[in-house]
Image: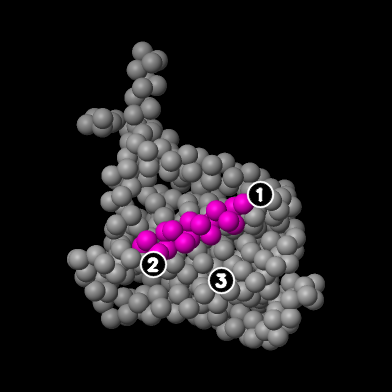
Amino acid sequence: MEFQVILTMFKRVLYEISVLSPSYFGAVMATGTVSLVLYVNHLIIPALLLTFLNLAMYIILLLFLVIRILKFPRKVEQDLKRSDLGPGFLTLIAGTDVVGDEMILLFHQFTLALTLWITSLVLWLTLQYYFLLVLILREEKNGFKDVNGLWLLFPVSTLTISVLAVDLSSYLPSMIYAGLITYFMGWIIYLVFTVLIAFRLFLSRVSVEEMIPAYWINGGFPALASLSSSLMVIHSASLHSIPILHTLHGFLEGTGLFIWTYGSWWIPLLFLLFLWKHVVRKVSFLKYDFQFWSALFPLAIYDLGTYFTGRVTRIPGILLISYVFLYVVLILWIYQFAGLIYNVFVKLRKPIDGIT
């Protein structure tokens, strides 16, 4: 009897792995960023607890991904070729970078963090160009209806590489070059995709089902860019051997503030769209939705970017915004993580008739 129960549960786990969304590393991105927010606010013990939790989530999701690739290769291939799912694999890149940031900032593990950065760079080169080729060469195209919030993971995954490279420059100064190059590269990619997103939202009909949480990334990328530029400005004080960093000091500070204000403009609109979906159109917010990790990460990174933008620019009021968002992000993370745990238990107890 016990063996049958274990076998049944094993089949259920395998089934859930087979249908696991490529975007699930968004949970790692969000949790890791929340831990970093706690860290910069000197809440060290909670930051460490979330970091250990995030590392466990990262390892488990990596294991699930490997199992999925080995046991369900056709499903993985199908997901890779879908314009509405494929870009979700880019969360693996960003999640790896966020874990790398935790390792370097909280544990000072330079070698491990550098290894994670190199891994994410290889994944970036492989996955980004694969998806771009798929988007260009696919035969069936529906115009702007194919565009969705997950496409913003192209610039986001580029900027997470930049942020980790800048953090690594504290130990290896030449890494600042990689941070600077990927910073500008992320900007260019974002300018392309944000235009497509704007056309999609403003010039095409958007249904409730299509208003996925990933659109929040349009508010998160600007904060991520402001974070990267602010960190480079801060590091320029100690990296005297990098002349280009000092040459671009004012430019980096200006572009960081510029893109932060753009992201701040998007945030209220995204909140209004959230209310439209869940209050006006009455889509239940109480039901767990894994996609909400894609909204939680931008909010957390907005908090982090706001904190460092406030430190660099010293504009009154900006740091206050980051302190307010700290509590907002914490409450939302607790809600989402509780939903994740509840969802796991519910799915493990579901009947699996027809699952082989």
Q: Distance between the residues labelled 3 and 2?
A: 18 Å
Question: Residue lying furthest left in this view?
Answer: 140
Q: Which mark is residue 112?
A: 1
Which comes sooner in the sequence, label 3 or label 2? 2
**Chief secondary structure of the magenta portion:** helix
> Looking at numbered disc 3 in the image, what kind of residue is underneath it?
Thr
Range of the magenta residues? 115-131
Residue 346 vertical position relative to residue 240 in the rendered view, above or below: above
> Looking at numbered disc 1 in the image, what kind of residue is underneath it?
Leu
Residue 21 visible, this angle: yes
> Looking at numbered disc 2 in the image, what kind of residue is underneath it?
Trp
Residue 194 vertical position relative to residue 11 in the rendered view, above or below: below
Give the secondary structure at mark 2: helix
Mark 3 — residue? 182
Q: Residue at x 37, y 49 (%)?
A: 21
Whether tag 1 and tag 2 are in contact, CB under 8 A, the answer is no
Mark 2 — residue? 151
Camera-side residue: 214 or 14? 14
Position of 291 compared to 237: left or right? left
Q: Does the magenta stretch include residue 151?
A: no
Q: Distance between the residues labelled 1 and 3?
A: 21 Å
- Can you say which quadrant of the picture contains the N terminus? top left
Q: Does the magenta stretch include residue 118?
A: yes
Q: Quadrant of residue 138?
A: bottom left
